[in-house]
Image (cartoon, rainbow, N blue to C red):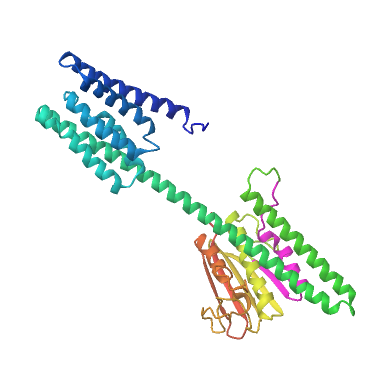
Amino acid sequence: MRRSSRSPLRLVADVAVSLVVGLYLVALVMDEVVQRAGPLVILGMVAGAAQGVALWWRRSHPVRVMAIALAGGAFVHFLAPQGVFPFAGLVALGSLTAVRPPRVSLPALAALLGLTALNFLTTTSGDAQFAMVFPVVVWALGEVVRNRRVAIDQALRRAISEEQGRIARELHDVIAHSVSVIVVQAAAADDVFDERPDQARAALRSIEAAGRDALGELRRLLAVVRPGAGEEPPPRPGLDRLGELVEPFRAAGLEVAVRSEGLGTGTGVGGGLPAGVDLSAYRIVQEALTNTLRHAGAGRAEVTVRAVAGMLELDIRDDGCGNGSGSGGKDGNGDEDGDGDGDGAGGEGSGDGGAGHGIAGMRERAAMLGGTLDAGSLPGGGFRVRARLPLGAP
């Protein structure tokens, strides 16, 4: 048997509404027994009870319940015109309007107004006019509830979409970086395996380290999408780990220099930064260096991190030759023509034509924090990625 999904409070409220409305309508019709008797009175009592029972399903089947309330209300009004207010119809209209758009609820409002207008034939004009106000008020309140639900649902969908995008960016950055380092190091190990086995072993150790780092970050992401797994996720990376970040690039043959200004000395530059800024800055540097390694044919890259006037500035430049293969990157003239001519740090980075990553992904990260990111070729050769992130960003 299917269990009811209603909360105890809602269950009590629904039972109370059905009982009160049904008993009221039955009593209203029974009052007519004094003046008349016969099958019409019995049918009227059945119609009144049916309206009360139908209200139990007003949340799951609002249109059908509204139709029953209108038909039963018309019959009850015929037998007991002293009942000015169509209570069952008002309750049904409120539930219908709260879950259906106006193209459905407005015809129901018009029908209920037509039913209520029968009072002009059976009671005073003032009472009839007063009764006509209630369906409009109930419809307006139902619309307020529906609009609030729609706003909450849209906000929820937007939050889910943003979270999916964030996880996709994280996965791209982790996998693209790690796989790029592994591929380059594996190729280097193969080249020197016979002549210089010590260098080959060093390359294999770098491959192992890159794989372990990737697994750690993937575990952290899985802990986010699977909360309550019971495993403590690894700490999220930040600028204080820039030293660890650049080591695999150096081992792969890319000379990387790291400088910081206004954030302390050495490579531990991320202390005290907002968590979102810290992670995004780390990912931007990671993506830019990964693209340099994969596409630029560069021998040297320079990373500068500085804090200026409430902004965190990232400057990543290389001496690449401009033969990047990333899709959607900037070409040698700094144009975003999407023809796969991006060079250096500005290449698309995914190398597989995947839109939304590379430069686009870095720009997304910066824009989410209210910052900016520019990428383009340098006049004397090479490529530059420059990002500005507000330190007050969440």
Compared across the picture, whether 147 is left or right of 202 comes to: left
Compared across the picture, whether 263 is left or right of 192 comes to: left
Q: Is 249 one of the magenta-colored residues? A: yes
Name of the residue lying farthest toward the front: 39
Depth check: give the residue in front, 102 or 264: 102
Depth check: give the residue in front, 77 or 10: 77
How many numbered tags mark residues here? 0
Up/down of 92 relative to 143, above or below: above
Percent position of residue 332, x then y? 57, 84
Up/down of 277 relative to 326, above or below: above
Percent position of residue 37, x then y? 19, 16
Residue for point 60% across, 68% down? 314
Residue for point 29% across, 49% down? 103
Quarter occupied by residue 360: bottom right
Q: Which residues are magenta?
A: 232-260
Quadrant occupied by the C terminus: bottom right
Residue for point 27% across, 26% down? 47
Depth check: give the residue in front, 376 or 265: 376
Asked if one can make out residue 327 in the rendered structure from this viewpoint, the answer is yes
Up/down of 312 relative to 30, above or below: below
Up/down of 111 relative to 339, above or below: above
Percent position of residue 264, x then y? 67, 61
Quarter occupied by residue 88: top left
Percent position of residue 6, x then y? 46, 32
Asked if one can make out residue 262 in the rendered structure from this viewpoint, the answer is no
Q: Is 358 one of the magenta-colored residues? A: no
Name of the residue lying farthest toward the top: 34
Quarter occupied by residue 62: top left
